[in-house]
Image (cartoon, rainbow, N blue to C red):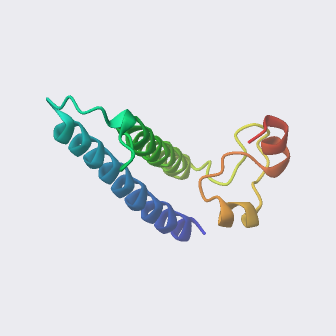
Amino acid sequence: MTADARALLEELRVRAAARSASASHALDELVHDREGSNDDDEHDPEGVTLSSEWSRLSALAEDAAAQLQQVDDALARLEAGGYGVCTSCGRPIPLARLEVRPFAEHCVACAERLGR
């Protein structure tokens, strides 16, 4: 299980890092494209507003960064020998939960209690 979990977590990490880099690059391009522009895009009926696109890209970047942190935390627990053990109660996290959420840090009961 440990080797399978490590492989899955590392794959998730690669995907999350790629999503994070892509969103950051798109944000950088948006800023670059709009530098020095005085366009009133908030009232442009033809396109997406700058603030709308900024919000969308920021949300994508934040989501990818959060997943990357969750995966990194799970890899650290794996290295420390605590992967698959609830960080709240110390009981094993059911395999079915880890298959759905490989970076889960709480068993089902604790996750429900904590609202996660």
User: Which residue does the image show at 61% across and 69% down from the upper left?
Assistant: 1
Q: Quadrant of the C terminus?
A: top right
Q: Give residue 14's quadrant in the image.
A: bottom left
Q: Position of residue 25 (x, y in %)?
A: 25, 48
User: Which residue does the image show at 44% across and 43% down from the upper left?
Assistant: 65
User: Which residue does the image show at 18% across and 42% down from the upper left?
Assistant: 33
Front in this rendered view, residue 51 or 81: 51
Front in this rendered view, residue 23 or 89: 23
User: Which residue does the image show at 49% across and 63% down from the upper left?
Assistant: 6
Does 106 sit above or below residue 13?
Answer: above
Task: Report the residue that reaches farthest toward the left.
Answer: 36
Q: Is residue 51 left or right of residue 97?
A: left
Front in this rendered view, residue 25 or 112: 25
Q: Total of numbered circles in the picture?
A: 0
Q: Is residue 24 left or right of residue 98?
A: left
Q: Position of residue 32 (x, y in %)?
A: 17, 39
Q: Position of residue 56 (x, y in %)?
A: 45, 44
Q: Position of residue 104 (x, y in %)?
A: 65, 51
Does 95 sit above or below residue 56?
Answer: below
